[in-house]
Amino acid sequence: MKVVIASDHAGYELKELVKKQFSDSMDFEDLGTHSTESVDYPDFAHPLAEKVGKDTELFGILICGTGNGMSMTANKHANVRAGLCWSADIAALARQHNNANVLVLPARFIPAETAFDIVDTFFHTGFEGGRHMRRVEKINL
Ligand code: RB5
C-alpha cells in the first residue's frame, strides 16, 4: 500500500520510526522533513494534501508536535479529511465515521508504541458509509 508521509522537525523522529515499523506493509513516499532542523509545518502539509486531494486511492500521514498545525493546513484542501488521532479508538472512528484519508499524529504527546497502534488501527479500519456518507459529503465547500 502506498502512503505519503511528512512531518516538521518536531515530528521527524517519529516519522522515521513509523517508516521503519511499517516498512514491510507500506510503500512510503517521504515528502520530508529530513532532519530535526526547524522548519514550518505548512511547507510539508500542503504538498502532501495536494497529492491526497487529487487521488481517491491515496492515504497520508502527517506528524508535527501537537498535530494541530498539520491538521489545520491539510484540511484547507478539497477532498482531504485529516484526522488528529491520539488513541487507537479515535483513529478507528476517524476512519469509520469520517472516512479520514490523512492520519495526523501529535509527536510530542504520544509515545512511539501508541503511534504504532494508531497507525495500525487507522490502516485496518474501513469507512462505515450509510449516514456517515451523507455527512462526509457535506464537508467540502
Ligand atoms: C513546532 O514547534 C510546533 O509548533 C509544531 O510542530 C506543531 O505542533 C504546530 O502545530
Image (tube, grey):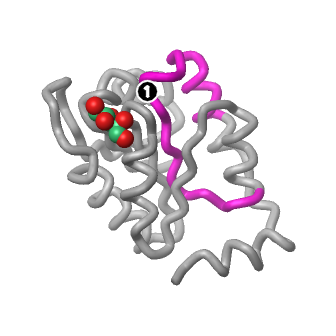
Question: Is residue 110 inside the magenta stretch?
Answer: yes
Instruction: Please give the name of the residue rendered at 60% of the width and 21% of the height, measured from the top-left corner.
Output: 114
- Give the residue type at disc 1: Ala
Query: Horizontal and vertical percent for residue 71?
Result: 45, 51
- Check the image and name the residue furthest to the left: 37
Q: In screen coordinates, is 85 left or right of 102?
A: right
Q: Looking at the image, which is closer to me, 80 or 121?
A: 80
Q: Is residue 124 depicted above or below 97 in this figure?
A: above
Q: Can you tell me whether the CB of the residue at mark 1 lies under 8 Å from the nearest atom of ligand 1?
A: yes
Q: Quadrant of residue 72?
A: bottom left
Q: Residues within 10 Å of mark 1 (few under 14, many from 20)?
A: many
Where 85 falls versus 78 (above or below)? above
Placement of 81 over or under 125, stated as above or below: below
SS type, badge 1: loop
Residue 8, quarter of picture: top left
Write the residue at 27% across / 45% down.
41
Q: In screen coordinates, is 77 left or right of 87?
A: left
Taking the image in four quarters, ligand 1 sits in the one at top left
- x 43%, y 27%: residue: 107
The location of residue 20, given as percent across then percent down, is 41, 23
In the rendered structure, the answer to whether residue 54 lies left or right of residue 36 reads right
Disc 1: which residue:
107
Q: Is residue 25 magenta?
A: no
Residue 130 coordinates in the image, percent (x, y): 86, 72
Residue span colored magenta: 97-120
